[in-house]
């Protein structure tokens, strides 16, 4: 059946591309592809034993693919409800628009039992994203886990329609990989389908203005810079939120493929400023329209700015390495 083949090919592409969403990118703006890129040295020696480079993996310059095969990539990107023996069991697959209700779920292993041991990543055992299919509504939540492995959190979704729930977690088990499992959620009410918001490089949220610089390109790592201001003044005292000054999630319009992008640099590393700019490196798995959601914390509150971006280019183009990714510092 075709689906299996497609998912495999897609997973391979994701494994090859999402792995580059790290590193330190000083370069901003559309980056020239033929600029000699730095190697991710920390990822070419030791670590993962796999090698997808039949040629010369250690050579500097272009390699055909970013062969980052570390455990931290999550190839499925939320497109599957079950992967690597783990299943997202969404106990509340239906909600009513505008009404607060507990969203409950469990992560089940192969034996059907709810998983109760998770590795903390970005300060949490599990990150829950809820997004409407039209990408107009987004929530980044941190539910509470009961001792029996049931997770729950009150949620209120403003509009009826189809939603996707993503659980981003790593089981506390030797060799377990970070996974993002996705499940459908139906929200009843009067359904008025909305278009995905038009592409824009400026977003406003709670009185903040966030500007998006850089580019999202299919199959190539590019820097994204988000700059936060309020009342025309740059915000230079962003607060660490889950171990970073910003968290960026990208969802692909059409199927809600999930990219968790990590910031370049961490609070307290001596080089990362507390704003106004937050820098990320990201790779789009394909051309298409993506919605980016940035969470940042200021004055004790978490704010979310959203952007629609268009990633264009040849999908099958050779994948260039992240420019300036000289430090192997990895966000995970
Ligand atoms: Cu989170």
Image (spheres, rainbow, N blue to C red):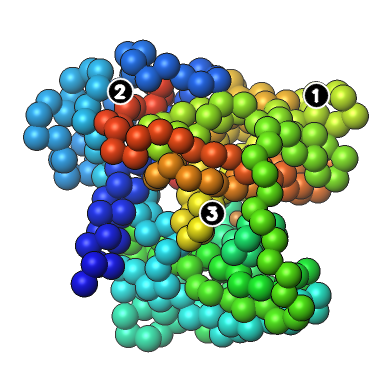
Say if mark 2 contacts mark 3, CB within 8 Å. Answer: no
Q: Is residue 273 visible?
A: yes
- Label 3 sits on residue: 253
Residue 11: give x, y in percent of width and height: 30, 54
**Label for residue 265?**
none
Establish whether ligand 1 lies closer than 8 Å to the Cβ of label 2: no
Q: Is residue 20 visible?
A: no
Mark 2, Cα crowd under 10 Å, few <14 / some 14-19 / many 20+, is many
Q: Is residue 115 above or below residue 175?
A: below
Q: Residue at x 90, y 29 (%)?
A: 231
Disc 2 to disc 3, how far (Cα)? 31 Å
Q: Quadrant of residue 147?
A: bottom right
Q: Quadrant of residue 234?
A: top right
Q: Is residue 300 above or below residue 84?
A: above
Q: Residue at x 87, y 40 (%)?
A: 207
- Label 1 sits on residue: 234
- Label 2 sits on residue: 39
- Looking at marks 2 and 1 on the same chain, the residue that comes earlier in the sequence is marked by 2
Q: The N terminus appears in which quarter of the rendering?
A: bottom left
Disc 2 to disc 1, how far (Cα)? 33 Å
- Looking at marks 3 and 1 on the same chain, the residue that comes earlier in the sequence is marked by 1
């Amino acid at each position: 059946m075709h689906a299996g083949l497609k998912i495999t090919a897609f997973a391979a592409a994701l494994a090859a591309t999402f792995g580059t969403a790290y590193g330190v990118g000083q370069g901003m703006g559309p980056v020239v592809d033929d600029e000699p890129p730095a190697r991710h040295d920390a990822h070419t020696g030791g670590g993962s034993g796999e090698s997808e480079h039949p040629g010369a993996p250690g050579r500097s310059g272009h390699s055909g693919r970013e062969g980052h095969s570390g455990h931290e990539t999550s190839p499925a990107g939320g497109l599957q409800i079950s992967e690597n023996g783990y299943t997202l069991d969404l106990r509340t697959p239906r909600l009513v628009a505008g009404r607060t209700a507990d969203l409950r779920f469990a992560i089940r292993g192969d034996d059907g039992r709810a998983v109760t041991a998770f590795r903390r990543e970005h300060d949490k055992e599990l990150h829950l994203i809820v997004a409407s299919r039209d990408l107009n509504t987004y929530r980044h939540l941190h539910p509470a886990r009961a001792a029996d492995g049931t997770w729950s959190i009150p949620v209120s979704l403003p509009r009826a329609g189809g939603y996707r729930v993503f659980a981003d977690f790593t089981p506390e088990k030797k060799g377990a990989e970070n996974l993002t499992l996705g499940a459908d959620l139906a929200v009843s009410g009067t359904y008025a389908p909305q278009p995905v918001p038009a592409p824009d490089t400026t977003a406003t949220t709670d009185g903040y203005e966030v500007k998006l610089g850089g580019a999202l390109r299919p199959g190539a790592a590019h820097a994204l810079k988000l700059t936060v201001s309020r009342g025309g003044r740059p915000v230079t005292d962003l607060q660490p939120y889950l171990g970073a000054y910003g968290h960026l999630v990208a969802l692909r319009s059409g199927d809600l493929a999930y990219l968790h992008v990590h910031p370049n640099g961490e609070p307290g590393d001596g080089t990362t400023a507390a704003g106004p700019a937050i820098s990320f490196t990201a790779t789009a798995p394909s051309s298409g329209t993506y919605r980016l959601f940035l969470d940042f914390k200021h004055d004790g509150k978490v704010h979310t700015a959203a952007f629609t971006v268009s990633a264009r280019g040849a999908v099958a183009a050779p994948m260039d390495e992240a420019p300036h990714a000289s430090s192997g510092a990895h966000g995970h």
